[in-house]
Amino acid sequence: MAEKYIYFFGGGKADGDTHLRDLLGGKGANLAEMINMGIPVPPGFTISTKMCFTYYKNNRKLPESLHDEIKENMAKVEAVKKMKFGDPSRPLLVSVRSGAPVSMPGMMDTVLNLGLNSETVEGMSKLFKNESFVLDSYRRFIQMFGNVVMDIEHRNFESILEKIKRKKNIIFDNELQTQDLKEIVNQYLDVFKDQTGQEFPSDPYKQLELSIGAVFGSWYNKRAVTYRKLNRIPDDMGTAVNVQAMVFGNLNNNSATGVAFTRDPATGENVFYGEYLINAQGEDVVAGIRTPNPINKAQEDHTDLPSLEEEMPEIYHQLIEIYKTLERRYKEMQDLEFTIEDGKLYLLQTRTGKRTAQAALRIAVEMVSEGLKNKDEAILSLDPEQLDQLLHPMLDPSENYEVVARGLPASPGAAMGKIVFTAEEAEAAALTGVKVVLVREETSPEDIGGMDAAQGILTAKGGMTSHAAVVARGMGKCCVAGCSEIRIEGERLYFITTDKVLERGDVISLNGSTGEVIIGEVKLMTPKLSDHFAIVMGWTDKFRRLGVRANADAPKDAGQALGFGAEGIGLCRTEHMFFGDERLPLVRAMILASGDEERNRAVEKLMPFQQKDFEELFRVMDGLPVTIRLLDPPLHEFIPHEDREFEDLAQELDIPVERLKRSARGLQESNPMLGHRGCRLGITFPVIYRMQARAVFSAAVKLLKEGLTILPEVMIPLVGHVNEFVTLKALVIEEADKIIGSAGVACAYKVGTMIEIPRAALTADQIGAESQFFSFGTNDLTQMGFGLSRDDMGNFLPDYLKQGIFALDPFQVLDREGIGQLVEIGVEKGRQANPELKIGICGEHGGDAQSIDFFHNAGLDYVSCSPFRVPIARLAAARSALLEKKEAREA
């Protein structure tokens, strides 16, 4: 039997459902599901994701065997619609749309109104008794087909349209008359021939074949590839193609098209929310070409515009029933696309709606309270990385500032930066560290890279469901959309209600929560976390097995971490304490000393500072473990580099400048990443590690006497051989026992090591037999495992990612195949030697959701990350535990 590539849906039945999402893509699976639920959906068929890569393997051609299957399924569509594809008297038109297993809104291509030619245009005009509508559909089809299939730039068509609209003094496309449209169609056909050297194809099946290939081909277009990289979506999913009978929102004034969300995507409020346009196609709403109307009277942003609820009350209430049915079925906020054709409602799409982090949390909590889902389902519905949005800044309400324009509050938060007018400018600025605000008439999918690079987005056109608004919310970017009070001309931004004019490079601020546009900088502040956040975090702590600590070196950071729910400090980098104005001269004196006596004097002067640092940290973390890493970086990082600095230090130390420079040159290393650092410093300069150990335990016993609970964990870095650890462990214990013994208090402390050298992972049984805890330093483990330097790899990493050599940056997401194996070996061997061994991770991967899932499965006890990623880690750890539970249940 030949493999099935096409799945039909229509006439009340479908070949598939949501269980076939990987095969049918999200759009196709949901269309099939809606058909099975009895929801009005135009008939059609889905060509599976398997065909996507067959198409590429077949030199970007559809295999001959597919054509018969297409015609067989087209006949089923014709039977449901009682129309025929290519028939001059009752012509069936179709749309050709993409649909990946993961939602990628607007990133791939679409062709609408396919099947039109000179004969079917005439037949449709008689059938619908509306020649203008048919010609409008035809000119749209020529432009879409020309752009998507033949790579003709939109401006070649748009310039013709705008010229005729100016000539006729017309603002909106739907004001064009029949004669105008005839002229546009003829000129569009001329453009097509001029640009391609061939006539516009009249055979509907040829149009279909080329369009299906183009949509499959769009899987690797620039914007789709960029979107997948930004959202960590793998390239090997492929897209399905959905061929569906057209329904026409631009047929007459009893027709319309719209986009709606079953809840407010910005706030999460349980209100039906969306926009529509009468006598329009879907692209008009999404692209923001015309300012849309609200679907109901509750939307304050559009109070002066007639709503769908008022204009078409029966359709509106039918839409209400459908959206409630879909929410109950999917247990999730839905993003709907609908068309009304001459008074009849059709659903064209349902999918999980993109929403802000604030909205996501509120929706999760309220759906649990409404009984739509349980807590497990609520946690699994949340994206840990999206919580990062909650910490995005907002404008300080105590500041005075001048609001020069207002648009729609499309995506909350605040943004500040220099004006740029193109996505390319935004991307270039981000590479140099310049903060920018992208200002556009409206954004399009091609702008995805610039939208990601910008701090915020301001558009003159578009509504709350426009491309800019939807993509910005998904990214967590501040966005003010549809700001009709601005005008963009070249590299200038005009404000219609004032005489203000800004140019490229001038600074503006945006308030995405209110829609305000402000000239100049405004002070920002960190937002307060909502009650919904606290509720969700409480749930995560009941489900997760992994502990979550924070990397923190100062009391302020430690306090911040506690506020976010950290259960201790997993990494205190003591070298960060050495760079203060009072300390750095002492550190330099210690490093550049000519002998032990001189070095000991400098170390003793440094000791009180270190003790004070640890006291402050322990006080904040009362009752929680604090892991303190002894000095790790190479000594050359602390020495002067400029002549003036050498002169000042020589004077302060009362030694000749030349001697100082000679000592400094002696510290320079060819490869400091592999040089005299970490435990090697402690072995060659034991006085440094002794001082740090004394400071740790002196601080601990002082606070223990005050009644605090202090749990110090001393971590020895960069161990590659067990003998290094044994030597320095003895040093730490000797100093600890002296201080604790003389103080007469009990102090429960641990001595452990970082596993950051591949050899340490491979010999973890030897080291584990001597150690009380491991903490994987995955930053250095990745550097040494790959033979890469994070400081130098920026020159070639972009090429590696672009060419697909690395799917992801291994310093952001743990490399499971290589570095992950080292972690698993370290865990297994370490616990074989010491079943009580406590194991964590303190590299940057400790705050990455994908990596946390690996650490959960590898059996680690905790992860440690920056304070601001603690909530992300808590949610990711809970999701990992729930997924493990779910998989076990299904097995």
Image (spheres, rainbow, N blue to C red):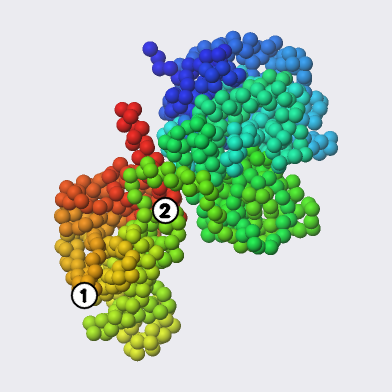
Task: Indicate the secondary structure of the residue bearing disc 2.
Answer: loop
In this view, 798 is above or below 603: above
Depth check, mark 1 against mark 2: the one in front is: 1
Verify CB contact (< 8 Å) between mark 1 and mark 2: no
- Residue 109's place in the image compared with 12, above or below, is below
Q: Quadrant of residue 802?
A: top left
Q: Nearer the viewer, residue 659 or 217?
A: 659
> Label 2 amino acid?
Gly
Question: For this view, does 304 lie left or right of residue 535?
Answer: right
Q: Position of residue 103 (x, y in %)?
A: 51, 34
Q: Which residue is mark 2?
A: 565
Q: Residue visible at 68% across and 19% down?
A: 344
In percent of width and height, residue 789 lies at 35, 58
Left or right of 609 on screen, residue 100? right
Give the vertical position of 522 relative to 375 (above or below). Answer: below
For the question of whether residue 198 can be seen, the reply is no
Q: Which residue does the image show at 19% across and 65% down from the upper left?
A: 729
Q: Residue furthest right?
A: 168
> What is the secondary structure assignment of the residue under circle 1?
helix
In the displayed structure image, the side of residue 725 where residue 640 appears, left or right: right
Which residue position is annotated with label 1?
742
For the point 60% across and 11% down, the residue is 80
Q: Amino acid at mark 1?
A: Ser
Q: Is 171 located above or below residue 113 in the figure?
A: below
Residue 885 pos. (x, y %) = 34, 35
